[in-house]
Image (cartoon, rainbow, N blue to C red):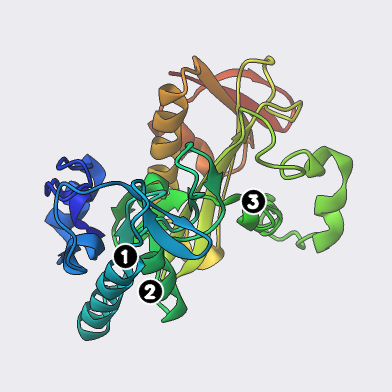
Amino acid sequence: MVSACLAGENCKYNGGNNRNEKVLRLMADNEAITVCPEQMGGLPTPRVPSEIKDGLVTAKDGRIVDAEFRAGAAKCLELALQEQPDLVVLQSRSPSCGVKQRYDGTFSGRLVDQAGVTAQLLMENGFRCLDVEDLITIHGGFLIRKLSIEESDLLKDFLYQAIFIPQGAEAPARDIIERPELRIYYEDFGSSPGDHCLVAEAAGQAVGAVWTRIMNDYGHVDDETPSFAISLLPDYRNKGIGTRLMRQMLSLLKEHAYRQASLAVQKANYAVRMYKEVGFEIIDENEEEFIMVCKL
């Protein structure tokens, strides 16, 4: 299920749309239904913009339109219960469809960390909702999306999974990730401009992650170059997910105007070949590791 404006339907409050190419590709590859809660609740297009103020959806001209918004939300829920969508992709920050945030009711552009009425109702009834701005792609049945700040503890789990264990060696104790040289991969993640993370998800579970930071890690080359970390749960390796995560992250870094990215990898790690396939080249090495860089 997707917000109709994302599919290019002219149902936005100003009569336009929020056509999104990622959503269109998603719809081309999957069975999808579109919804506009505001139209479904009986509001016209175009219409006066609205925000939630003191718990009520209120138009900018002062009219209370809460009943129409909630009627549209109820119709979306009825349709979702009938069709059982695996994923609901909604327009970010909308008083109807915003999943993580919406405008605060002052019509000043300020945001609050609360959902719109339709997104909230769908989530309360167990439907998986995603802000369109967090959608990256769906590949081979796996959703690739941006990591939410409140999920940053996942990086500890994936960092441990990323530790290379040579054949025949025992896995280290999990508290190894508390060492200072490893804490830099996750501590206060999201607080710096170079912090980016994409997650691969299957059936609502995070099964892989790729993330970058500008940090003095094993793959550090300079203070302008983000370093990569990537990890997949064992059952999801060798399925092409890591390659797709890497390519999507490289594209994201390019969008943010980074010139290159770096990483360090043990010479015996099978992932060396994958890194080369996505564009990384060896620029240095020590006894155990290659230092690799990808020009963007």
Residue drawn at 26 percent across, 47 percent down: 48
Between 201 and 121, the one lying in front of the other is 121
Q: Is 183 situated left or right of 109 in this image?
A: right
Q: Nearer the viewer, mark 1 or mark 3?
A: 1
* Mark 3, secondary structure of its residue: helix
Q: Which mark is residue 212?
A: none
* Mark 1, secondary structure of its residue: strand
Q: Quadrant of the N terminus?
A: bottom left
- Pointer 2 local density, CA inside 10 Å: few below 14, some 14–19, many at least 20: many
Position above or below: 159 against 221: below
Q: Quadrant of the C terminus?
A: top left
Image coordinates for residue 83, horizontal then vertical, percent: 20, 80
Between 68 and 85, the one lying in front of the other is 68
Q: Which comes before the other along the chain, label 3 or label 2?
A: 2
Tell me whether circle 3 and circle 2 mark residues in contact (CB < 8 Å).
Answer: no
Tell me whether circle 2 and circle 1 mark residues in contact (CB < 8 Å).
Answer: yes
Q: Which mark is residue 88?
A: 1
- Tag 2: amino acid: Leu
Q: Which comes before the other along the chain, label 1 or label 3?
A: 1
Residue tagged by mark 2?
122
Residue tagged by mark 3?
162
Image coordinates for residue 12, horizontal then vertical, percent: 21, 47
In this view of the protein, can residue 57 be seen by the observer? yes
Q: Is 210 situated left or right of 86 in this image?
A: right
Image coordinates for residue 174, horizontal then vertical, percent: 80, 62
Residue drawn at 61 percent across, 19 percent down: 225
Question: Residues under labels 3 and 2: Cα distance?
Answer: 35 Å
- Tag 3: amino acid: Ala
Q: Which comes before the other along the chain, label 2 or label 1?
A: 1
Position above or below: 248 against 290: below
